[in-house]
Image (cartoon, rainbow, N blue to C red):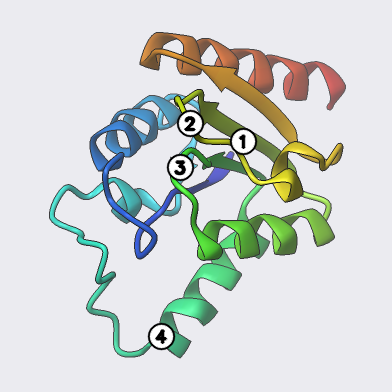
Amino acid sequence: MKIYFAGSIRGGRDDKGLYNELIQYLTSYGKVLTEHVGDKNLTEFGEDGPSDEWIYNRDMSWIKEADVIIAEVSTPSLGVGYELGKAENMNKHILCLYKNQLNKRLSAMISGNKNLKLVNYKTLDEAKKHIDKFFKLLEKNC
C-alpha cells in the first residue's frame, strides 16, 4: 500500500510534530511517500528542492502512484487543498483529519465535499482510531 500524506508546509508548520506522529503510525499500513512532511526541520519556507516546478512534478507523480491519500487539514494550506482536488479527480480514496479548534472553521470546500471522508478528532489516539477504521473499510470494500 502506498500512502500520500498531506499536511501544511508553506501554510504553517505548527502541526509538524503531529504530522510526524501520524506518518510514523501510517507506516504500519504501508509506504508513506511523503515522509518529509513530518520533518521537524522543514520550515514554512518549504523544501530546498531544485525548483517549485520540480516539487510540483514530484508530488503529482506521488499522488498518481498512491493508493490512498491521508490529509491533516487543520492548518489551512493552498497546497493541501490543491492536492486533494487532484486526488479526487483521480478517484483516490481520501481521508481528511480535522482537529476541532476554537474560533476556526474548516473550509466548506473540504467539509462540504461528500467525495472526501472527513473525520473530526481531539487527540492523536482518536486520529489513529479514525485511520484504523478507514483502512478496515478499504480492506472490506476491496
Q: Nearer the viewer, mark 4 or mark 3?
A: 4
Residue, disc 3: 31
Distance CA(mark 1)–CA(mark 3): 18 Å
Q: In the rendering, at what x and y percent does residue 57 appear? A: 53, 81
Task: Give the alpha-carbon distance from disc 2 to disc 1, as whole Å.
Answer: 20 Å
Q: Residue furthest left?
A: 41
Q: Residues within 10 Å of mark 3 (few under 14, many from 20)?
A: some
The mark that comes first in sequence, 4 or 2, is 4
Callout in the foreground (4, 2): 2
Element under label 3?
Answer: strand
Q: Earlier in the sequence, mark 3 or mark 2?
A: 3
Q: Secondary structure under badge 1?
A: strand
The answer to whether residue 13 is above or below residue 117 is below
Among the 4 quarters of the image, the one containing residue 1 = top right
Q: Earlier in the sequence, mark 1 or mark 3?
A: 3
Q: Secondary structure at mark 2?
A: loop
Image coordinates of residue 84 in percent, x first then y, are 67, 55
Between 30 and 22, the residue placed more toward the observer is 22
Q: Which mark is residue 96?
A: 1
* Residue hosting label 4: 52
From mark 4 to mark 3, how far is it between C-alphas? Answer: 24 Å
User: Hey, what amino acid is under mark 1?
Assistant: Cys
The image's mark for residue 103 is 2
Query: Distance of mark 4 from mark 1, alpha carbons?
Result: 25 Å
Front residue of 20 and 141: 20
Disc 3 marks a residue whose amino acid type is Lys
Q: Residue at x 69, y 15 (%)?
A: 136
Mark 4 secondary-structure assignment: helix
Crowd tier of the residue under label 2, counting other residues whose Cα lies within 10 Å: few below 14, some 14–19, many 20 or above: few
Q: Residue at x 45, y 14 (%)?
A: 122
Frontmost of labels 3 and 2 is 2
Quick check: marks 4 and 2 in contact, CB under 8 Å?
Answer: no
